[in-house]
Amino acid sequence: MAEQESSPEEGSASSSVFLSLGPQCCMSTFSFNVTMSSAVVDQAADLVIELSSTPKTKLDEPAFGNVFTDHMLTIEWSASDGWQAPLIKPFGNLSLHPACSSLHYGIQLFEGLKAFRGDDNQLRLFRPMLNMNRMSNSAKRACLPAFDQSELLECIRRLVEIDQDWVPHSESASLYIRPTFLGTERSLGVKKPANALLYVILCRVGSYFNSETKGLSLWADPKYTRAWKGGTGNYKMGGNYGCSLLAQYEAEDHGCQQVLWLYGEDHQITEAGTMNIFLHWITEDGEEELATPPLDGIILPGVTRQSILELTRKWGEFKVTERYLTMSQLCSALKQLRVKEVFGSGTACMICPIGHIVYQGEVRERSRLMLTSRIAKELIDIQVGRNTHKHTQTHTHTHTHTHTQMFLHLSVTAG
Ligand code: COI
């Protein structure tokens, strides 16, 4: 039977099981949904841990994605034996067969989420079940095997706990968590891989762009297309990013930092670089609106995107809409001074103002930062555990559908 794509709200058909964690764990308890299906075996309880004997020096805020922590998580799968015991081991190179399917056919996907250290010294993962759910949807699209989302999250939590000293003591930096899933079958046949490797690495990160306060510059040209209907743009697969590189360098030739990805004859605005995009403006009908393109198959369902929509809808101060936006609408709004702000969102950058757009040879500018700064502040407050009464829930009891909560965090007590 073909499996349906799930949204985090649907959750898994599961019985909710209260797990208490082993002696390695600093945090006392929290609840998990455990899918009762033998097809998806990935048991955090079987986790094997080999600690590194040579911890590395921790640089303060290295460039994004360059410096990795001391440990990594690996979990192997084969069609014949299913999931093997998860292993946390010293960070190191992978050994892959030269014919493995991820190298030849891009049978691969990844995720990105972050752990933050709060003022209370607790570590929090921001809405991690949304990432687990998106990863599971990407796995279906890539013909990689199903996994138990809650069990994987527990393995990740253990990994973060082991490398907890790497989580920066700063609200402008965090620990970036990169789950990755590869087809590893040693065969050149174009088919579902019979072997796969799921691994997770961590790196300490500061800000993604070094121009955030000034605002990012975007090159908008229909010459390149990031995603198309029926493609993979709404899944987090490496190929979506690799294919964007040439355009990214062409944007630089036009004096811009990133590409504003357009789609279709009417030049629909879709994404900005590796981010979702938002427009805060006054519509032609005179209404204040925050708008972002809808999840119609070519837009990545970003966790930050969803959080911004939920947060601003909760404010109830202006209309918040998911709808198609075109360059001609944006250009006339800019001309009529109806555009308040334009910004991008993503896990790596969180929220990033867009300063100007180069389109059809003209520079279109807009660089106010009021809404961007307000959203950034509220999100940071949530991520570091301020305002917990408003937006977060720490789970100490059996609970189904925990991931439907607004700004759920999992707490890991820092040692
Ligand atoms: C993220 O924002 O997490 C991304 O995936 C961007 C990444 C390609 C650096």
Image (cartoon, helix red, strand yellow):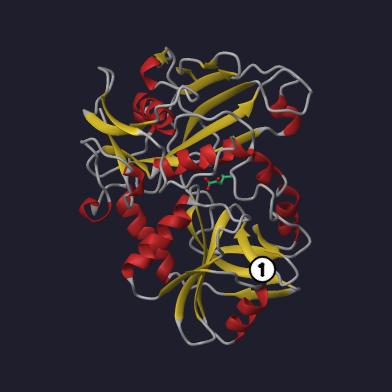
Q: Position of residue 348 (x, y in %)?
A: 50, 47
Q: Position of residue 385 (x, y in %)?
A: 27, 47
Closer to the camera in the image, 115 or 119: 115
Q: Quadrant of the N terminus?
A: top right
- Residue 274, can we see it? yes
Q: Is residue 48 above or below residue 133?
A: above
Q: Which residue is tagged 1? A: 268
Closer to the camera in the image, 313 or 241: 313
Q: Is residue 96 left or right of residue 395?
A: right
Q: Residue at x 75, y 70 (%)?
A: 265
Residue at the far front: name it: 1
Q: Residue at x 35, y 49 (%)?
A: 404
Which corner quadrant of the image does residue 32 belong to? top left
Q: Position of residue 72 (x, y in %)?
A: 48, 23
Q: Is residue 176 left or right of residue 329?
A: left
Closer to the camera in the image, 205 or 162: 162
Closer to the camera in the image, 264 or 216: 264
Q: Position of residue 238 (x, y in %)?
A: 64, 39
Decide: few, some or many residues near mark 1? Use Cα within 10 Å; few <14, some 14-19, many ≥20. Answer: some
Which corner quadrant of the image does residue 2 belong to? top right
Amino acid bearing label 1:
Gln
Q: Is residue 323 above or below residue 295?
A: below
Distance from mark 1 CB to nearest ligand 1 atom below 8 Å: no
- Residue 92, can we see it? no
Q: Quadrant of the C terminus?
A: top left
Q: Identify the element where label 1 is drawn.
A: strand
Q: Is residue 5 left or right of residue 381?
A: right
Q: Residue at x 55, y 19 (%)?
A: 76
Label total for image: 1
Q: Is residue 241 above or below residue 49?
A: below
